[in-house]
Image (cartoon, rainbow, N blue to C red):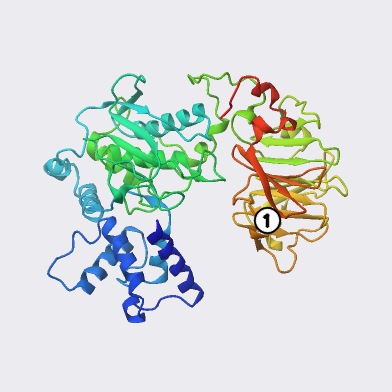
Amino acid sequence: MVARVGLLLRALLLLLWGGLDAEPAERGDQELRKEAEAFLEKYGYLKGQVSKAPASTRFSNALREFQWVSRLPISGVLDQATLLQMTRPRCGVADTDSHATWTKRISVLFAGRRAKMRRKKRFAKPGNKWYKQHLSYRLVNWPEHLPEPAVRGAVRAAFQLWSNVSALEFWEAPATGPADIRLTFFQGDHNDGLSNAFDGPGGALAHAFLPRRGEAHFDGDERWSLNRRRGRNLFVVLAHEIGHTLGLTHSPAPRALMAPYYKRLGRDALLSWDDVLAVQNLYGKPLGRSVAIQLPGKLFTDFEAWDPHNSQGKRPENRGPKYCHSSFDAITADGEQRLYIFKGSHFWEVTADGNVSEPRPLQKRWAGLPPNIEAAAVSLEDGDFYFFKGSRCWRFRGAEPVWKFSQLCHAGGLPRHPDAALFFPPLHRLILFKGARYYVLTRGGLQVEPYYPRGLRDWDGVPEEVSGALPRPDGSIIFFRDDHYWHLDQGKLRVTTSGRWATELPWMGCWHANSGGSLF
């Protein structure tokens, strides 16, 4: 982990200094080159190089291969774009043979069926595929801050992606029986060798083994999420690592799920043409139909909102409001300390004494407001509601819109996809939080004040990527992220206490849920 952090810091410094125009050896930065060599060695780029070639040639050739797989300009030079690519979170499986395997797959595509039959044996190396089409799997454990039903739903959907486009079928094995594929979350070194030890948030998020072992491991210290906004998207990583357990290598194809750097969910299908071609080369096309079923990625953005009717969870989901058992999109409070908690297309009102309403549709209260808003705040001066999502923002006075149409708020310097919003009484201003920075808005407007954004170090102890922030009657501020809260003492300007909001803050409306014991 130290080497990765050092590589990242040096890459950022070089960006600030104007970037790299030549190899680090020519700039005297031998340490940076050594760290890049360690990265290339770990992910298999130096293994295929001719051992008798000069070290500089092997290094340059390995860089070219890495740039090709990563879809970067191929120069063989450790430039700033290549450095930053090496620091991005990625799959821990080596990229060995990605180029050769992809070339064979493309040659078959253009050579036709007869060539495919001749070369089929060359694709199926021993241990690189399953020799059956019905496979069982088991979810051994899951991140403690995510609800079990939602994680199981994401796992089930990830396997379904591959069965939709191939002749494979999957079923979840009983907890006490054997399973072909096992999915497990680990922390740090977990007896896979030091090169496979997990290093906390960032770096290698997960790795998997070929069919002969049938295991996929995920970093238990990563901040996993099951929605599109916060944390690392667990569903995408699950689907990618399952691909490895089926025998698929990394792909350099545009927007491929099996690219070494995990793709983002969007409007396009989650599997690229190359993903489909790769799995069908190993296992054939779907049985009983001629066309593979593909769904757009936007359908897989929020598993916490899915109906867990097939779940075998031990806790009844109807005990207390839904947000108490998972998370919320946004939270705010009005001048009477009435909370408004938002999740999906609904919201809950919670009175100051903790009594919570039934879930209510957003559209019935604020017409035109989209679901899954990202941040919300109530001005304690005029009582207006401000909502934020993507690059748009809305303002309502009661149930009536102040603006006829939503505003393109990033034009005033506001961040896209903010994490949380807060009306800060001492400044009489709205504040937006995004990642490790915060933005103070001009009074009554949608412009960022001069000298902002600033770093969260001004709010000592507040974590990055918060999901909500509330001013309290005593002048303190409560910050939320996942199932935790942080209490910031305004006088001391630092966090003084923290804990789990559903079980420790009775005014959050979760007391019915708490009667059943621990939630998370």
Q: Nearer the viewer, residue 400 or 502?
A: 502
Say which residue appears at 53% left-offset and 39% top-offset: 301
Can residue 422 be seen here? The reply is yes
Residue at 53% across / 46% down in the picture?
231
- Circle 1 SS class: loop
Q: Considering only vertical position in the picture, is 69 above or below 51?
A: above
Q: Quadrant of residue 4?
A: bottom left
> What residue do we see at 41% from left, 53% from top?
203
Q: Nearer the viewer, residue 159 or 9?
A: 9
Rendered residue at 65%/20% (across/down): 515
Q: Which residue is mark 1?
A: 459
Picture quarter with the C terminus: top right
The location of residue 305, given as percent across then percent down, is 58, 31
Disc 1 residue crowd, few under 14, some 14–19, many 20+, Cα 10 Å? some
Instruction: Please name whichever residue, 483 or 434, is drawn nearer the observer in this view of the structure.
Output: 483
Percent across and percent down for residue 3 are 38, 61
Residue 93 in view of the camera: no
415 w.r.t. 404: above or below = below
